[in-house]
Every structure is written in structure tokens, then in C-alpha cells.
Image (cartoon, rainbow, N blue to C red):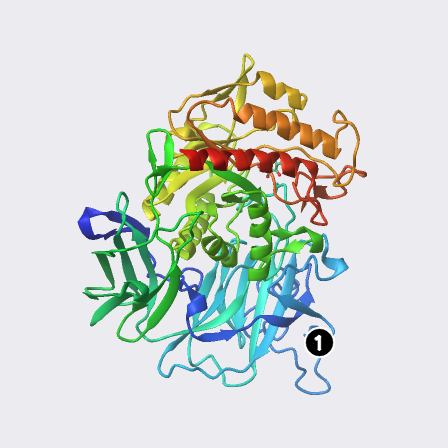
Amino acid sequence: MFSFLKLSKGIVVATLLVSATVNGQTPLLTNVGARPGISLNGKWQYIVDPYETGFYDYRWKERSQNDREAYWNSDVPTNKTDRKEHGYSDKYTINVPGDWNSQDAKFLYYEGTVWYKKSFDYARSLSGGRTFLYFGAVNYRADVYLNGRKLGSHKGGFTPFNFEVADTLLKATGNFLVVKVDNKRSADEIPTLNTDWWNFGGITRDVRLVEAPQQYIREYAIQLKRRSVDELQGWVKLNSTATGNITIEVPELKLKKQFPATGDSISFSFRAPGLKLWSPESPKRYRVVVSSQEEKLEDQLGFRTVEVVGNKILLNGRAVFLRGICLHEEIPSETRRAYSKADAVKLLLQAKALNANMVRLAHYPHNENMTRTADSLGILVWSEIPVYWTINFNSEEVLSKAKVQLNEMITRDRNRASIIIWSVGNETPVHPARTTFMSNLAMTAKSLDSSRLISAALEVHNVNGASVVDDPLGQYTDIVSVNEYIGWYGGLPSSARTAKWEVKYNKPFFISETGAETLGGFHSDSLTRWSEEYQEWYYREQVAMMKRMPENFVGLSPWILNDFRSPRRNNPVYQEGWNNKGLFDQKGNKKKAFFVLKEYYDEMEQQHKAR
Ligand code: GCB
């Protein structure tokens, strides 16, 4: 499955072999926003199909392509005697992008199949080119049909995929696009049956028809070379053997470099004198143009380096303390998935209000607006795949599914300066099969992108009163990260006073979660669970403990920025289907604990400036 791509100066990266089509998909196009095409967002018609009648016949056999009862085929009766038992209608419409749960009360808890249908006309703007149908994400499984023909399918609710659409299939008018979306949870998927977040279903991100010339740029990487302040390096990959030159331009720096294409990719390295580096303090981005004979793609790129030296994380060569916060991809006040640029700005400005310089995007890759907005606002990012809790670690097939999601996450976002950490999972139980599985993922992540740091949120355990971090997976990660809830899931917040941390790895040590739950607006004394005062006390004790952490402590991302929906949370007074560990409550009000963490972050920022 892997091939090796040689970069200049002896750098070799492994890449997943991307030439083959899998489940009808074509290798992922990147930077689709910069490519010509049309949006297929908006109102789609739908049919709710809990029995999957549109897919299976009454003997539970998959319907054949031309089966008139199949929901991917025309719903129009041919004459007045014709019996049609399905139909798409304007009586039933749903917005794309968007989860279905928040769009109609009947969907709140729904897990199963919904058929989506869109009719559209299409005139290609590029003559002689190719057309792709691109989905930002569909949760969880998508089966896609155009004009009665199956294009293919995809599994994984948080990453993009695309299909090339043959010219012979596309019509100038009246195209009939149908997507069967199924968000049922199952044991051998990623995530598995059990999580602590809402299983929002639907076509949750943008849908586009994207155009490209016959020979097109599939993806590229342009980065600052490690330990350098002005040497850019990277590669460009095309879909087929190229002729002519590939050009990289950075107009603001008056740079225009040409590289002769050999085969279907080029690698390059060149100096960019006067380059200003990207950092949270100064998120400078440049307009960069990558072009081939037939195509021009523009991007906004920041340049920075990140590395571990000793037990510190260096950003642009300087030790950084990560003032982080975790967040789910949710807008709590509207109880829905976030998807738009406006949503991303809203969430990341909340993080900024806390004086955070980093976000942990939990527990799955968020939409591209989030990572692009993080680039523009100057917020460092931890991006994760949903290998969460009890995945089937004994299954090769499940491992392959995790690798597909890892590859899709990295392929989409490898040019985002904000992303410094790829995480391969969260709180997976220590066990030999799990460690083999997880270390395989960590090594795969490294081989796909050696320029970033690899981590996973691990657990801590108690040995004779000490908080011991010795998970064997720590050998394979660049940063050792743990989730801890001293004073919430065990004892009172004051237990943190006597906590002794023993971290067995001389690597950067990060607290990837800590938190306590409170119903916003509920006030009492600090010993009363669920009160804002309890959470405030919890944060005070935690901050005091952070100040006593071992010398390799490099930061924290408490749990969590906003309250979020979770069916596991059934206290009838204080939860009602919400996990209320947010520093902002369901309506967007700051809880008292917000100010405790902010004060700590202000202090850490001052210390960093003074160094
Ligand atoms: C955790 C999980 C997170 C949960 C959180 C909690 O350790 O990583 O997904 O939501 O705890 O609130 O218990």
C-alpha cells in the first residue's frame, strides 16, 4: 500500500499508493476551494429509510442497478398505472451542509439511513477537462449514485472523498444525484459503538463539482525546512506523467521558481530571502501559486518549523508553552455540527478570548474551515482521528480503516501551518494488541508527514499515590500526552494538591484533557457538584498543580471550550443529554472557571514574552 517519494536533500516520505481507485473513489484532490466548479450545497430532498428498503429487496439482497424500486433510480411513475413506492418531494427537504439531527425534531436521535437527492444542471467551464464530485464529509457511510449509476462509496464521517464523473454520465440538464447516508454505529468502525459525543448524521460538509484539466495537480506540500529560516521545500504530485515545468510563485517575495517535471511528481527546495515566519503572535501568510502547463492553483500558506529538542517543543526554534483548549465541532446554542467559516471564526475567537494559543480539535478531523481559520488567526492545532476508547484492535481491517482516515486527514491539511500535532487516538486501553495497532498508526502518521509531531491522548494510572505515566505507546509518540480528571472522576478538586507526577519518558509532556462539569448559571458553595463554584475550585486546584509539574511539562488543553451534546449524560437536572464541562455554557456565557484558566494563560504568556 505504500510507495516512497524521494525529496531533495535525501528526504524520503512514504505515501499511500494513491493511483488506484478504492470503492469507486479517485485519489483525493486537495485545495478544492481554489479549483473551478460549482457548489451543490443548499436544499436537498430526502427520504428517511430505517429499513433500507431503497437498497435491499424484501429478501435482503442488494437491489440491482436498474431495479425500479431502488431509491437511486427515478421516482417518477412512467404512466398512471405505474406503482411507485418511493418519491422525492419538496415536502421533505434538508440543508446541505448540515447534520440532520438539528434540522427536524424527528431526527434528534435518529441513527440509520436517509437518502438525499439533488437535481442540477451543469455546463463545464473548462473545455476538455475532467469533473469530480467532492464531499467534505458524510457521516458515516455514503453510497453515491448519479443518474442511476453508482459512483462508489466511502466510510468515515469526518474526512473528504471524491469521485471522477465520466463525461458520458453528466448531463447538461436534469442530473439526478442521490446519496444514501447511513450513520449507524458499529463495532468494527471508527469510531466504534461507544463515544461521548452525539452521532450527528448527514452530509455534514460542503458538496462540490470540481473541474480539473486532463493532467492536473492532485496535491502539493510547501514547507519551511526544519532548522532553517528561509529555505522552502516540498513536492507537487500530478495525476499522470507530466510534461513541461511546474512553477511555484510567491509574488510578495518576488519569487518564481520553475522545475522540470519528471514522471508524475517533482520535489524542490529553494531559498526565500526575507521570509517572515508564521507564529501565533504573527500569523503571516503568503499567497502561493502552484502551476503546471494546464493549471494554476492558489493557496494562502504560512511557514514555520516545529520540532522536539530534548524535552521541549520548539516553534521556529524557540520553546513554546501550549495554552490549549479542546473543542468539539459543534455550535451549542443551535445544537448542531459546525461547518462554515463563520462557525470556525466563532469557535476560534472563543478560544482566543481565553488567551489560548492552541486548540485540540477533538476527537476527529474538523472541517477545513477550522484549520484554514486557525492558520489565519494564528492558533496552533492538534488534529486527531476518531480512534477512541475501545476500537477492535485485533482486526487488520479496522487498522486499514484507521489508516484511510489518517491519510485523508493528512492529505487534506498538510499545508496548514497551524497544525503541529497529528494525534492517532484517544484513551485507548493499554494492552499488547492495542499497542501494536496504535504504534502502527503512529509510524504511519510519521511516514505520511515527518514534518509534524505525533501524539495520542493516553491515560495516567495511580501507583502508591503517584500519578504514573508509563503507557508503552509513549515510546512511539513525539509528545507524551495524558488525560486526567483528578477531582472530578475521583476525589475532590483538592486531591490535586498532593498529586505526584511520575512521567517515565523524557519527552515533552502535555495534559491533553482535564475538566469538571457544571450547569451554567447554577451557583452554590464550591463543594456542591455541578455548581459553577465547584468547577471554579477544580480549575484553581488544577492550575496550582500545573505550576508544580515536572520540568518537561509543555502545556495543556483542558476539556472543553463549550458544553456539547452527549447521549451518555443523563442526569435529569444538570445534564439532560449534555456534557457540561464547557468553559462556555450552552448559551455561550462564560462560566466562572473560564476566568481562572484565562488568568493562568495570561501569566504564561507574560512569562514567555519575558524569556
Ligand atoms: C474523556 C474523553 C472525552 C470525554 C471526557 C469526559 O476523557 O476523552 O471524550 O468527553 O473525558 O467528559 O468525561
In the image, 561: left or right of 511?
A: right
Kindly indicate the quadrant of the structure image that contains residue 34: bottom left
Task: Say which amino acid is labelled 1.
Answer: Asp
Say whether residue 393 is visible. Answer: no
Q: Is residue 111 above or below residue 75?
A: above
Q: Quadrant of ligand 1?
A: top right
Q: Is residue 306 above or below residue 200?
A: above
Near-viewer residue (147 or 564)? 564
Say whether residue 312 is visible. Answer: yes
Given the current orientation, which residue lies at the most extreme top position?
A: 464
Near-viewer residue (272 or 606)? 606
Quick one: quadrant of the C terminus?
A: top left
The residue at the point 45 percent across, 41 percent down is 424
Residue under label 1: 90
The residue at the point 48 percent across, 67 percent down is 134
SS for callout 1: loop
Given the current orientation, which residue lies at the most extreme bottom position?
A: 79
Residue 188 position, x and y percent, is 53, 44
In the image, 361: left or right of 225?
A: right
Near-viewer residue (220 or 351)? 351
The residue at the point 43 percent across, 48 percent down is 419
Residue 32 position, x and y percent, is 43, 66
The residue at the point 51 percent across, 38 percent down is 323
How busy is the neighbourhood of tag 1: few (under 14 within 10 Å), some, or many (20 plus)? Answer: few
Q: Is residue 307 above or below residue 52?
A: above
Residue 303 position, x and y percent, is 35, 52
Report whether the residue tagged 1 is closer than 8 Å to ligand 1.
no
In the image, 63: left or right of 404?
A: right
Residue 449 position, x and y percent, is 34, 47
How many labels sit on residues? 1
